[in-house]
Image (tube, grey):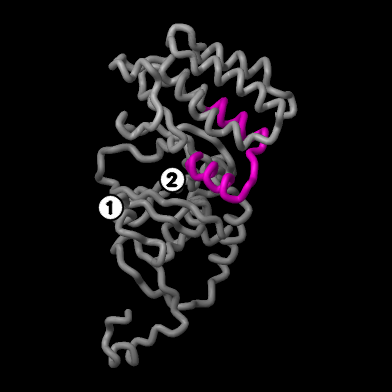
Amino acid sequence: MWGDSLIQRIEKPSWGQKRQFDIISKKIVLTPKEVPKLFHMCRSCILSLIPLCQIEQTSSQLPLPLIMRNNVLKLKLDDFRINPLKVQAQNLQTNSYLANYIHSGQEVEIKVQNTESDSCIGTYTNKLAILKDQGLDCCVLDPVIPLNEILRVLRRTNQTLTENFTWKVVEAVIHYIMTNSKGHHILQPTMIKVTKIYPKVFVESFDTELDQVKQKPPELETGFFYTEKTAIWFLGFILKEMLPLIASRQTKQILEKLVKMCFQPDPHKRCSATSAKNFVKQNKPEAS
């Protein structure tokens, strides 16, 4: 826009037009202000009443004609606005963008993929919806914050972790260990994600170089292979990072016992994931 000549600016003025990022062309485009049509106003009103994560379910349950279902309850790229100021080079490489859902104002993450690609889209834990429009598959995701970022902000602002959130983290990590017995076991706070719109805690598995880990269990120093007991040690490490920020004395005392069970130098003396789950179930306060 600013690189256009003066004559072009006069012939095609951009006053009153909004700038946004176009996913298809990967360029900044100008959208003129228009008076919305009655259909678009009604559609926007309907979609604003339905949570993003329930649009697909609502569409399948309501006894609507197919043409109405496709035109009203089918998400399109135009339902989202991407601020060009938030688009960075990394977004262009990963095809992942932060966008505003125009019907509710919620900020979501859009993961874009060509329909010709063989890889499957929509397997994300934080998935809200899937849309197909203009030759693209788009997965609408609930933006996430890593646990280490939450802990950093709480330390800086002198705040504490809520009891309910603390137990959700503990249960999410134990569940991950139990369901990924043959997976990657270098667990770090960066792998624990918290969704923004619909609060949920989950563990996102990705490769972590052993050299990048500050603290390691003794067996990794001697070259032993990863086991469930190794993952349990990392559970203790994560809890140790959280302990200073836990306000509830009762919860802190319970988790201190669990940390001792996880931090045994001998892997054979550490608790198993099942034992940790039972310990939490027996000692977790009912109010949590």
User: In which quarter of the view is residue 11 placed?
Assistant: bottom left
Decide if residue 20 is on the left or right side of residue 274. Answer: left
Dividing the image into 4 quarters, which one contains the N terminus? bottom left
Please tell me which residue lies in front, 76 or 162. Answer: 162
Residue 233 coordinates in the image, percent (x, y): 46, 20
Which numbered circle lies on residue 93? 1
Which amino acid type is marked by label 2? Ile
Q: Residue at x 56, y 60 (%)?
A: 105
Q: Mark 1 to mark 2: distance in Å? A: 20 Å
In the image, residue 26 sits, relative to residue 186, either above or below, namely: below
Disc 1, SS: helix
Residue wearing tag 2: 130
34 drawn magenta: no
Residue 90 in the image: above or below residue 27? above
Numbered mark located on residue 11 in the image: none
The residue at the point 61 percent across, 37 percent down is 245
Q: What element does badge 2 sit on?
A: strand
Whether residue 63 appears in this view of the structure is no
Which residue sits furthest right?
A: 287
Residue range of the region highlighted in magenta in the rendering:
146-172
